[in-house]
Image: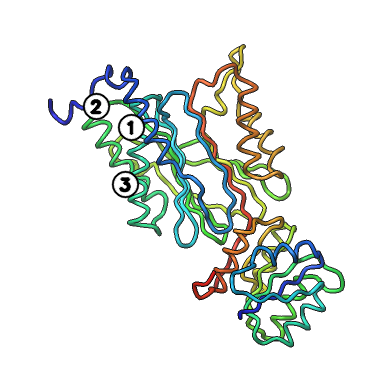
């Protein structure tokens, strides 16, 4: 058997319970636990529908802030979970190598790795929706990628949606011309929410999706109570809406507790 | 010992700040409003940091910051407040404040913020 055959068979991907359990444990172990980032209060979590999830998130502290990533590999199960692990490892390496890069630069490098692995070596068809945010301790954010809108609850009670313009990762060899950086500012007290489509696409018994409007409403109601309340409250609302969660569900809620302006 | 001035009209908040910074090698002086705070800054050249509320009787926090700037005192000031109005935040930055922290705060977050501006010589 060549190295290239190792992960090429769908039977192996979907049917080996033991391997799935191991992969699930590996995946859970590389998710960030308690992360301290200056000025931020963070609550995040992923609910995989399978033993191995296809969702991904990470928070990587750096000297003057952090990197925040969220993504969703098409599908779920072992194949999607393996790709999620590739994303996690690659991004960790890229951030350490280039902590001051722009998000678009790291996304393009990440895409190259994913394209090589998914399309050329594994001969598979998965792609990834992905958003990468750079946060600085003075409240600035810069983000890039193609994923669900970022929601920000402002001090005046308004919820703003920041669209990330880009394209799927792993589908084409070079995403540079589709990947642009956008910037915004978090003010003290603002709450930012990143989420995967498992939240808004959860269906009730009639097949109606939970939807973006409901998410925005629940988010707005819970912001005053902090990011843990936001994360838990949205999960509760989705669970109340749907008889069975059938897609991975990930939430990253962040409150800007303070901003700093060193000389 | 490095001395930090806490200016806040809430005794509870002053106590919370003391508790968050306890055992980290800082001395704490407390004042209850901007007038007291300004006097303390005038008379203490060894202050290493000021933690200052915004809404206080007699003299508010931003007025205090403006006065400190006018006096030319180099002590760094962090605002510690329930206020989240971006216009006030911008004003504080223009006046030379070093940061803005929203109350209620997590003790670990406050301690990390203080350490950012006042290193504790490894004894924290």
* Between marks 1 and 3 in the image, the one whose residue lies nearer the viewer: 1
What residue is pinned by disc 1?
A: A82
The tally of labels here is: 3
Q: Earlier in the sequence, mark 1 or mark 3?
A: 1
The quarter of the displayed image where residue A235 is located: top right
The picture places residue A90, in percent across and down from the top left corner, at 33, 45
Q: What element carries label 3?
A: helix
Q: Which of marks 2 and 1 is nearer the N terminus?
A: 2
- At horizontal 62% and vertical 49% (from top left) the residue drawn is A255
**Circle 1 marks a residue in which chain?**
A
Is the C-beta separation of discs 2 and 1 under 8 Å? yes
Mark drawn on residue A109: 3
**Circle 2 marks a residue in which chain?**
A
- At horizontal 51% and vertical 34% (from top left) the residue drawn is A250
What residue is pinned by disc 2?
A: A7
- At horizontal 43% and vertical 34% (from top left) the residue drawn is A129
Q: Is residue A148 above or below residue A10?
A: below
Q: Is mark 1 on a helix, strand or loop?
A: helix
- At horizontal 68% and vertical 33% (from top left) the residue drawn is A218
* Between marks 3 and 2 in the image, the one whose residue lies nearer the viewer: 2
- Quadrant containing the N terminus of chain A in the rendered view: top left
- Quadrant containing the C terminus of chain A in the rendered view: bottom right
Q: Distance between the residues labelled 3 and 2?
A: 23 Å
Q: Is mark 2 on a helix, strand or loop?
A: loop
Q: How crowded is mark 1: few (under 14 residues within 10 Å), some or many (20 or more)?
A: many
């Amino acid at each position: 058997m060549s190295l290239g055959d190792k992960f090429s068979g769908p039977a192996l991907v979907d049917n080996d319970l033991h391997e799935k359990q191991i992969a699930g444990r590996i995946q859970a172990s590389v998710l960030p636990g308690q992360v301290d980032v200056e000025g931020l209060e963070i609550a995040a979590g992923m609910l995989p529908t399978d033993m191995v999830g296809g969702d991904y998130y990470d928070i990587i502290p750096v000297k003057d802030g952090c990197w925040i990533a969220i993504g969703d590999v098409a599908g779920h199960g072992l194949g999607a979970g393996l790709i999620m692990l590739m994303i996690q490892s690659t991004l960790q390496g890229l951030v350490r190598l280039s902590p001051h890069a722009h998000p678009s630069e790291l996304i393009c490098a990440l895409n190259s790795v994913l394209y090589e692995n998914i399309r050329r070596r594994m001969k598979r068809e998965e792609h990834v929706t992905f958003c990468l945010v750079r946060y600085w301790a003075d409240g600035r954010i810069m983000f890039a990628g193609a994923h669900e809108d970022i929601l920000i609850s402002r001090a005046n009670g308004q919820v703003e949606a920041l669209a990330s313009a880009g394209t799927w990762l792993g589908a084409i060899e070079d995403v540079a011309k589709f990947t642009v950086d956008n910037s915004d500012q978090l003010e003290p007290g603002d709450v930012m929410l990143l989420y995967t489509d498992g939240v808004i696409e959860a269906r009730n018994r009639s097949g109606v999706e939970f939807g973006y409007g409901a998410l925005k409403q629940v988010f707005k109601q819970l912001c005053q109570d902090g990011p843990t309340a936001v994360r838990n409250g949205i999960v509760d609302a989705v669970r109340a809406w749907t008889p069975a969660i059938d897609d991975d569900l990930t939430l990253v809620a962040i409150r800007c507790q303070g901003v700093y302006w060193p000389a | 010992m490095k001395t930090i001035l806490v200016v806040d009209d809430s005794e509870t908040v002053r106590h919370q700040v003391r508790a968050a910074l306890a055992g980290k090698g800082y001395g704490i002086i407390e004042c209850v409003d901007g007038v007291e705070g300004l006097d303390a800054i005038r008379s203490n050249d060894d202050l290493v940091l000021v933690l200052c509320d915004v809404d206080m009787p007699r003299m508010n926090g931003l007025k205090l910051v403006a006065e400190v700037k006018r006096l030319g005192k180099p002590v760094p000031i962090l605002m510690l407040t329930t206020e989240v109005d971006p216009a006030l935040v911008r004003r504080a930055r223009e006046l030379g404040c070093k940061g803005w922290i929203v109350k209620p705060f997590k003790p670990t977050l406050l301690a990390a913020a203080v350490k950012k501006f006042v290193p504790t010589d490894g004894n924290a």
